[in-house]
Image (cartoon, rainbow, N blue to C red):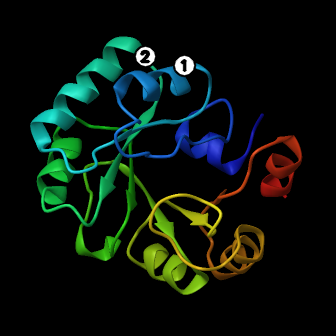
Amino acid sequence: MKTRVTELLGVEYPIIQGGMANIADARLAAAVSNAGGLGVIASTLHDAQWVKEQVEIARSLTDKPFAVNLIMESDLVEECARMCVELKVPVCTISAGKPDAIVVEGGVKVICLIPHARAAKKMQDLGATAVVAEGMEGGGHIGRMCTYPMVRQVVEAVDIPVIAAGGIADGKGFLAALA
């Protein structure tokens, strides 16, 4: 399957695992990446050393791209972001807070979770590689709008790739997200 997202991320399928706190570790991320999607390590409230250990484990289990999710509400987010740059992590997803408070550099692709089109435009202007339009059906800290109406608004507001999230649980939902 070939989409803007698969080409951007170097994955086989346009499927990105969520950065689920206390669940999404290196082993899960590597398994998802090995299956053709983009696996995500959730940094949650862990420190940079933990992130380094998880990245090393992921690299021992896969040679495919994976991501680290940076939680903006964490007091440790800046040190974790620096560690991701130092380790040349391919992708960072940024969630739970104001992503403009941190800049990830060094060739790391940045995907920001956003709750509405205005935030998507702001993240594009700040240099985000892509955005995840996550509707209220998704988990975590996100807005109050349903996924598909929001995705349509976000796609019209930005030029960067838009990834749909929230309530996509079967093939029909996946096809709707591709549309």
In this rendered view, identify the residue nearer to me: 93 or 129: 93
Tell me the quarter of the image containing the N terminus: top right
Check disc 2: other Cα within 10 Å, few if <14, some if 14-19, many if 20+. Answer: some
User: Which residue position is annotated with label 1?
Assistant: 34
Task: Report whether 153 appears left or right of 76.
Answer: right
Q: Residue at x 85, y 41 (%)?
A: 171
Task: Report whether 34 appears left or right of 27.
Answer: right
Q: Residue at x 35, y 26 (%)?
A: 26
Q: Percent from the top left, x then y, of residue 137?
A: 65, 63
In this rendered view, identify the residue nearer to me: 157 or 44: 44
Check disc 1: other Cα within 10 Å, few if <14, some if 14-19, many if 20+. Answer: some
Is there a contact, CB below 8 Å, between mark 2 and mark 1?
Answer: yes
Q: Percent from the top left, x then y, of residue 44?
A: 28, 49
Q: Residue at x 33, y 71 (%)?
A: 99
Q: Percent from the top left, x then y, of residue 87?
A: 21, 35
Relative height, residue 175 to residue 63 (above, below): below
User: Which residue position is annotated with label 2?
Assistant: 62
Q: Percent from the top left, x then y, of residue 114?
A: 51, 71
